Amino acid sequence: MPERLFSDEGPHEPHSKKVKGAIFADYTGEFPMPRVLNEPSPAGDDDAKVGAATGTPAARTSRGPAPAWLRAGRPALHELMRNRRQALWALGGGAVAIGGLGSGAAAMLGRPEDADDMVKTGQGGGNVSPRDAGSFSNRDSSYTSGQGDLNDLGASGTADSASAAAVAAMRATPRFPTPLNRDPVLHLLRRCTFGPTHADVAAVKELGIDGWLDQQLEPGKIPDPVADAALQTTPTVTMTTAQIRASVKDGDNKAMYELTRAVIARQIWSTRQLFEVMVDFWNNHLNITSPFDGGWDTRVPYDVNVIRKHALGKFSDMLIASARDPAMMRYLDNTSSDKRNVNENYGRELLELHTVGIDGGYNEKDVRNSAYLMTGRTATREGVFRYEQNRHWTGAVKVLGFQHANKSAKDGLAVGDAYLLYLATHPSTAKYIARKLAVRFVCDTPPQSLVDRLATAYQQSGSAIVPVLKVLFRSLEFWIAAGLKTRRPLENFIATARVVGTKPGADTGKALEDLYNFTRKLGQAPLGWEPPDGYPDVANAWSSAAGMLETWNAHRAFLQQSFKGLNNPRADSLVTQPAATMATYLDVLCNRLIFQPMQPAERDALIKFLGAKPDTRVTDANLGGKLPNLAPLVLDSVYHALR
Amino acid sequence: MNDLPEGERRPASLEELRRHGPNLCEAAIRVHADQVSDELAAERDRWSKGFTRRRLVQGAGFVGVAALGTQLVTSRVAFAAPEDTKGTLIVIFLRGGMDGLSVVAPGDDPNYRSMRPNIAIPMAALLPAGRGFGLNPAMTALYPFWQAGKMAAVHAVASPDASRSHFQAQDALERGAASVAVRTGWLDRVLAQMGPGTTFRAVAQGSALPRSLVGGEQAIVLNGIRDFRIDNDAMRSQTMEALKTLYTGLDHSLAGTAASTIQAINTAQKIANSQYRPMEGVQYPGGGLAGRLRDIAQLMKAGVGLRVAALDVGGWDMHTNLGRVDGGDMRNSLTNLSEAIGAFATDLGPLLDTTTIITMSEFGRRVQENGNVGVDHGHGNAMLLLGGGLNGGKVHGNWPGLSPGALDQGDLAGANDYRDVLAEMLKKRFNVQDSAAIFPNHQFKTLGVFKG
């Protein structure tokens, strides 16, 4: 590993002006076409060549027939430009695709077969598959559809190791520069932890990128003393259903609330950060809101036995465990489904959300059969999963390519498990989960070629997650994507706690309660998304003044010791090196909190904020104790808002 | 070229366009890109100097700066004079699939009674709504509006999107099309036609941005206006200045969010300083929706230029325990909804005449009840409308009935297209005339829900 990869970048990149705005200054016509103009991009595969991508204008000129409005010989540009702010929006999202051409253009460019028909009374088509009805593959894809896929981030392919991929990506030029520096160590930590700390940076430098990742992928071997100690305040989160029922009042949501607090504690303090990132991923993928009606005794064991147990294992195991879990049975109404009264809720979400995705090709009959297959799976009053064969629907079933005679109620559970295994290893499931992982770790609109490679790895590994993650970290797309993700409110909150150096204190339990209440103000309480599809994972969905304001308020709360019971460093203790002038003080503070210096204009603004000048002495009496007000502002900046 | 907006220029001929790129498509994109670039520059300017017209981009000299002046006003907080207020649209999305047959019940339909032996509302309990329909008695708080002609319903409304999936049905409704070629939200396109406005012209309440508002038009997501301020800050005004600088001239969507956040903080300070007092006698009930509507009422009365508000209410996915007329999830949810909207509508006073409140939900529910005193996902549904300009006190739309032959896979058929309802509303109430730009590829019918 070359040493330069580990060194911080210079004081400031000379092309700062470029980063700050003129994305079109060097425009060469190489922007990705809007999806409607695009031919399917050639899918890369596992042995794709390592190196910078070589899209040239010439290579793009021969693409596809000109759209109708051009063929008509009337360049109706004003039509295209009717709503340029939409293009601005698409650009602003960090996605420099001219995808949001606007409604007029969308309508014009739309394929004729997509056209909506009039309502067809009486033939709404229960047998039309959602895919044929026209759909994005999930909610997040819909949110980002105006941006188009970023099929070329500036580098692509799979290297032999994560560090080799990092080196190759550093040599390439990102197509979508962001304000964040590209230091691969920081990038790795921004994506694989809930926010870098200086201790993390030191750890990666000591172990190397590959060594650190290997360690993180075996979380059981990493000691976790701080998180373990903090979890003493949430004793129910490792309990079984029977233990919870014995120690909590009937119907009391105490355990579910302790779980939400434990999520915060683990995300801030656990040393097994990548594991916790994956736990969060799966808790949203197989979402069971906490708290929810019916989870008081079962939600915590679901977290233990389904999510945490298999977070780095096999998805097929996780799925089968979830389908034998009392909390899931209650959450999606399978406890109310039997052969006489089939409730479709679980059978449907199993297909749409948990496995093949809405564009997986199933139709309403498949949904019905999926629900039949799951009948009999229920939960007892005592919160124990039970298969009751007298509730199982028997008879031939067919869902997509899965068929079974399903003759005997006695074997219904085994038939269901076979069905679940079929779903977990289905190619559509591979693609669906691959894209979700790419959205989590790479960017909101990941290149299809990367998704395809991850899906291939998923299928080859029989749905084992670690091999997929290893391909992801060996991809150049991962390493070239620095700064392309925006932290969601909870991620910003946790990253603040981590970088500031918040530690458990005199009353950690009470403090965790306060932290949890704050996350509700942020609009992203842990495990708090009510519909079964989990929190959105793309920036467009989180574009919110309320969310932004509350993250700004959180920065102040952490730095002004508003969370009693924790050990919060004081804002004026953040800069330990002696700094003579305001300018150096601010540089040190920025390095401490955002791991890079600010742009000159920003630095000037912050110095002016204190009514000072760059060469004002830090000891100047006129500063009047205002220095601690700087730190929250540094965290308010875009450098802490992105990852 | 006569139909171009003032100040906008484009290549006069195909030949001229062709010079901009290796092929026509590319050229069009490049010219477009130049304009975008220009707007980005203007965005940066707006921060420090207010808006100024920018130089033309080199190399594309004949592509002018288009109507920047009007567009940029969008981002400025301005307190609109009362005569500038052209009405407010409040869209309440009932997430989960409201059971329209329980809300506007076809009381005298024997199929309704036979397929819903437990959950059908008894005829005597219904609030008469005409054409054999009756409103659920949980809507008592709204019934005075119905009787006064300020409320109406359209039944058997659907989207041609056939899916019974929550996501897909919501997604299609919120984008205003089932076709994936339509990527912006329908309310975003409405805003584009409404033209410029203030920071508060489009407000969503909650934590996430509703899909219907995704697009290029600015919308602001708030979670209450009363405490919308920077806390724990002894240097609040300097902080605001510094934040403004930190997000000035940044090519990132966060810059836009920061701009509206900062503007919202400033405005909130002005309007939220004093305790809001609803109109005499108005009691908002508890619950999230009521609080949000109360905030909306406050914003509207403060004259901040609110044109569109989008609110979400969850909890309508009643597979189980929809319940009977005297108890259950439907009674609870509907009572809460009705009391909240009723208080809001009363609180608005004369403003209600220029306001239109509509409810939408992704689909109706199956006609046949299931074994859990609930109903599974269905198709046709009822929409509720409240405000001025309605042909009120009526259930509108074609009614296909519930006879076995009329059902769509066991569900109430979609006899009326939601786009016809919305397009008529937009035309008659908000002067948004280009329905095809809001709902592409649709042939419109007028249902006569609104006057005029």
Image: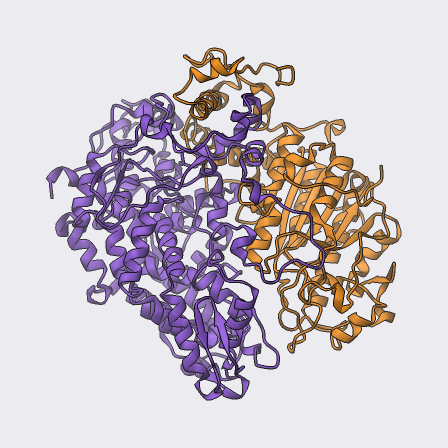
Chain colours: A purple, B orange
Residue A211, position as x, y percentages in the image: 15, 54
Residue in front for this viewpoint, B6 or A269: B6
Residue A237 appears in the rendering: no
Residue A238 appears in the rendering: yes
Residue in front for this viewpoint, A153 or A379: A153
Is residue B101 rendered to the left or right of residue B440? right
Residue in front for this viewpoint, A24 or A256: A24
Residue B57, position as x, y percentages in the image: 44, 14
Residue B27, position as x, y percentages in the image: 44, 22
Question: Which quadrant of the rendered structure holds the N terminus of chain A?
Answer: top left
Is residue A639 rendered to the left or right of residue A104? left
Quarter of the image for residue A152 reads top left
Question: Which quadrant of the rendered structure holds the C terminus of chain A?
Answer: top left
Q: Residue furthest left?
A: A2
- The number of discs equals 0
Q: At x 37% / y 62%, what residue is drawn?
A: A508
Residue A165, position as x, y percentages in the image: 20, 44
Is residue B123 rendered to the left or right of residue A235? right
Is residue A483 rendered to the left or right of residue A515? left
Vertical comparison of B323 with B37: above or below:
below
Vertical comparison of A597 with B325: above or below:
above
Residue in front for this viewpoint, A577 or A105: A105
Quarter of the image for residue B203 reads top right
